[in-house]
Image: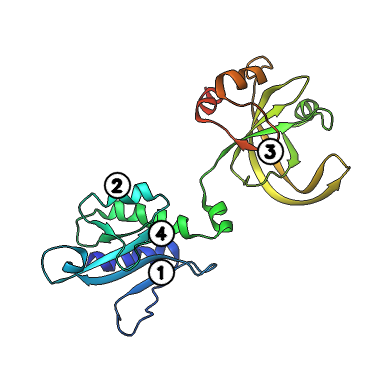
């Protein structure tokens, strides 16, 4: 079995995407695209070596993929088996030789990057790996301390971008002004209409308590001085250094 055949079987199995042959002039060019937004994430082609700047006139198979970072694309193009995207040179597209120059494991990695890069916003959110968030809690509107005394899983306002499996570190505002809880998001997008003039909610999520912190451990002062966090007004990403200490 050729590298081309291996790759096409791999794509059909993993991404459930069948090849599309769009050009009568190039019957062996196979396009793979997302079902929801129609964007290409892979293009298998056969071209002559000279068109890639290689010696010889024989035909070789290549895979075109789109990468998220132009610097990554440039770096790869300095390595054997990688070229600027043939016929798709804009938008961080690169061509990869399918002749053994690049291991199939690496090809699979860049194909996955292309799949994620070209995916719809909804699919990217679904496919992204679990993420850590810093989420504020205002004691004036909700007593989260008492809530976690009564139960280890509670409902919380749905934060934009948060999905099931994410970790949230709950920052409790004044007079506590510190991170008190580490929780796992167990369910999201639960319909819930609420508006009291201060708090507005269209959906809620469920968060399950995993760990408690002493009130003097991750204070706002420490967050500001050691981690560069000067405000916690809404869900935000957790800096790597803070993440390490929270999990330490």
Q: At numbered mark 1, what does the secondary structure look like: helix, strand or loop?
A: strand
Q: Nearer the viewer, mark 1 or mark 4?
A: 4
User: Which residue is located at x 35 percent, y 54 percent?
Assistant: 110
Residues under labels 4 and 3: Cα distance? 39 Å
Q: Nearer the viewer, mark 4 or mark 3?
A: 4
Answer yes or no: is residue 1 visible: no
Q: Which mark is residue 14?
A: none
Residue 53 quadrant: bottom left
Q: At numbered mark 3, what does the secondary structure look like: helix, strand or loop?
A: strand
Taking the image as shown, residue 194 lies to the left or right of residue 155, namely right
Q: Position of residue 66 (x, y in %)?
A: 39, 58
User: Residues at badges 4 and 2 in contact (C-beta under 8 Å)?
Assistant: no
Of the numbered discs 1 and 2, the one sitting upstream in the chain is: 1
Label 2 Cα crowd, 10 Å radius (few <14 / some 14-19 / many 20+)? few
Of the numbered discs 4 and 2, the one sitting upstream in the chain is: 2
The residue indicated by pointer 1 is 32
Q: Nearer the viewer, mark 1 or mark 2?
A: 2
Q: At numbered mark 2, what does the secondary structure look like: helix, strand or loop?
A: helix
Relative height, residue 66 to residue 130 (above, below): below
The residue indicated by pointer 3 is 207
Taking the image as shown, residue 166 lies to the left or right of residue 88, namely right
The residue indicated by pointer 4 is 91
Of the numbered discs 3 and 1, the one sitting upstream in the chain is: 1
Taking the image as shown, residue 17 lies to the left or right of residue 105, namely right
Residues under labels 4 and 2: Cα distance? 15 Å
Q: Nearer the viewer, residue 212 or 102?
A: 102
Residues under labels 1 and 4: Cα distance? 17 Å
Relative height, residue 49 to residue 210 (above, below): below
Q: At numbered mark 4, what does the secondary structure look like: helix, strand or loop?
A: loop
């Amino acid at each position: 079995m050729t590298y081309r055949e291996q790759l096409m079987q791999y794509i059909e199995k993993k991404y459930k995407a069948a090849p599309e042959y769009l050009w009568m002039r190039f019957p062996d060019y196979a396009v793979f695209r997302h079902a929801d937004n129609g964007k290409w994430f892979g293009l298998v082609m056969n071209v002559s070596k000279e068109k890639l700047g290689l010696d010889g006139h024989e035909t070789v198979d290549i895979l075109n993929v789109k990468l998220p970072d132009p610097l990554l694309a440039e770096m790869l193009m300095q390595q054997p088996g990688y070229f600027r995207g043939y016929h798709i040179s804009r938008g961080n597209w690169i061509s990869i030789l399918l002749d053994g120059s690049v291991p199939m494991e690496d090809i699979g990695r860049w194909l996955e990057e292309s799949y994620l890069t070209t995916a719809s916003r909804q699919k990217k959110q679904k496919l992204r790996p679990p993420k850590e968030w810093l989420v504020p809690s205002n004691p004036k509107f909700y007593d989260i301390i008492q809530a976690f005394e009564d139960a280890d899983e509670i409902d919380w306002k749905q934060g934009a971008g948060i999905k099931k499996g994410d970790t949230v570190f709950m920052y409790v505002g004044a007079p506590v002004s510190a991170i008190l809880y580490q929780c796992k998001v167990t369910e999201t997008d639960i319909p819930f209409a609420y508006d009291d003039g201060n708090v507005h909610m269209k959906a809620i999520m469920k968060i399950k308590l995993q760990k408690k912190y002493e009130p003097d451990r991750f204070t706002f002062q420490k967050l500001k001085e050691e981690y560069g966090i000067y405000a916690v007004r809404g869900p935000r990403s957790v800096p790597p250094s803070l993440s390490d200490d929270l999990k330490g």
